[in-house]
Amino acid sequence: MKEIKICVIGLGYVGLPLARLFSTKYKTVGFDMNAKRCEALMAGHDSTLEVSDELLQDAINNHGFVCTADIEAIRDCNFYVVAVPTPVDENNNPDLTPLYGASTTVGKVISKGDIVVYESTVYPGVTEDECIPVVEKVSGMKFNVDFFAGYSPERINPGDKLHTVEKIKKVTSGSTPEIGKIVDGVYSSVITAGTHLAPTMKVAEAAKVIENSQRDINIAFVNELSKIFTKMGIDTLDVLEAAGTKWNFLPFRPGLVGGHCIGVDPYYLAQCAQRYGYNPEIILAGRRMNDGMGEYVATETIKHMLKKGIQVLGSNIVIFGFTFKENCPDVRNTKIIDIYRALKEYNVNITVYDPWANPAIAKHEYGIVVTNELPTVKFDTLIMGVAHNEFKELDVTQFVNEKHVIYDVKGTLPKAIIDARL
């Protein structure tokens, strides 16, 4: 293959860190349809905070990295990487719209001999059965004759500054054995943790979708344990700590399962299984358990308020944290909204405080007010929803009335000051 010039399509949590990394070895262009996003990146700042200003500016100034919304600027690339979101719709069915759009873009610019690699999480077969036909139709070229493909599932962990993209082993694959070796070679040249070349693209797709499904099921199990032990008056984390002394006990903890991976990927696998006539009972049972935890937290909070004689109607409740995970501004598929909506049914007043979340995005996506300002008043109830580092340094008792309830979703507060935790 001639000298590689890479285009990464989709400059979000997955695409930007990867594009920045590729730029250290190859001529790299980042493409995103959001022109304002591209302008902000070229000004040297990533609003997702996944790439530091220093690294981004180094890529731009010293490695020629360019972010653009102009499709003509990517026409001379020959190695396209698609890193767009793969969400589910309101019925939890996979929404491949972003993938169809990105495939259309690739089809408009791809040339003979080029390779397109998909990173978006999908169920087995999507790359070949859904994406490639779009590229063929738009480009007028034939798959595995005029152009080729690969699949290398993303393994970005938003907010994690330790396990960055180059430090996480990467699964790769290609549409032919020869293309698989090329794709693997490109990735292995920048991924210091190494790569694993899967035998087919379907194997690589399946490997990705079960990674998060496995984690989802394990968290669902400990969430169910939390419900059982709460009824027994036993502290779940104490039980897990004791059980964890066995060498092969898996260290999962109860909690809310949101975000755009663990809370979404199992639905992709479930629908794929159903297409083959199999009803995946364990996968869907895990999803039902985890999707119901926000409402469970709200119900338990109300129970504790009533036990303490706190008037629920018109009470003032504060939720600390709104993002889907700690130390990250991403609010996509946050399960804190489930707690909020369930509590609202009791006609309470709710303040949501999160120094990481963008209030404008929260308002646009969920229609609620999120503040970045630390509360200056006292509340009847405090729910610690997200374990941001900033929260660990606070004495949260200063934010509640003398008679109060503190519910610790993440299990990070001192046991002596809380009324309940998952």
Image: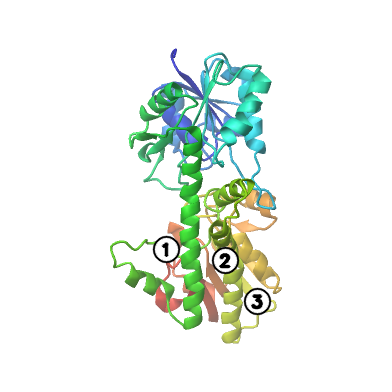
Numbered disc 2: secondary structure? helix
The three-letter amino acid code for the residue at tag 1 is: Lys
The image's mark for residue 315 is 3
Residue 310 shown left or right of residue 245 in the figure = right
The number of discs equals 3
Label 2 belongs to which residue?
Answer: 293
- The crowding category of the residue bearing disc 1, from other C-alpha atoms within 10 Å (few below 14, some 14 to 19, many at least 20), is few
The image's mark for residue 392 is 1
Residue 76 shows up from this direction: yes
Dot 3 or dot 2, earlier in sequence: 2
The three-letter amino acid code for the residue at tag 3 is: Ser
Numbered disc 1: secondary structure? helix
The quarter of the rendered structure image containing the N terminus is: top left
Residue 39 location in percent, x, y?
A: 58, 30
Residue 359 location in percent, x, y?
A: 62, 52
The residue at 31%/61% (across/down) is 248
Residue closest to the eye, 312 or 81: 81
Residue closest to the eye, 270 or 139: 270
Dot 3 or dot 1, earlier in sequence: 3
Residue 236 location in percent, x, y?
A: 43, 73
- Quarter of the image for residue 413 reads bottom left
Dot 2 or dot 1, earlier in sequence: 2
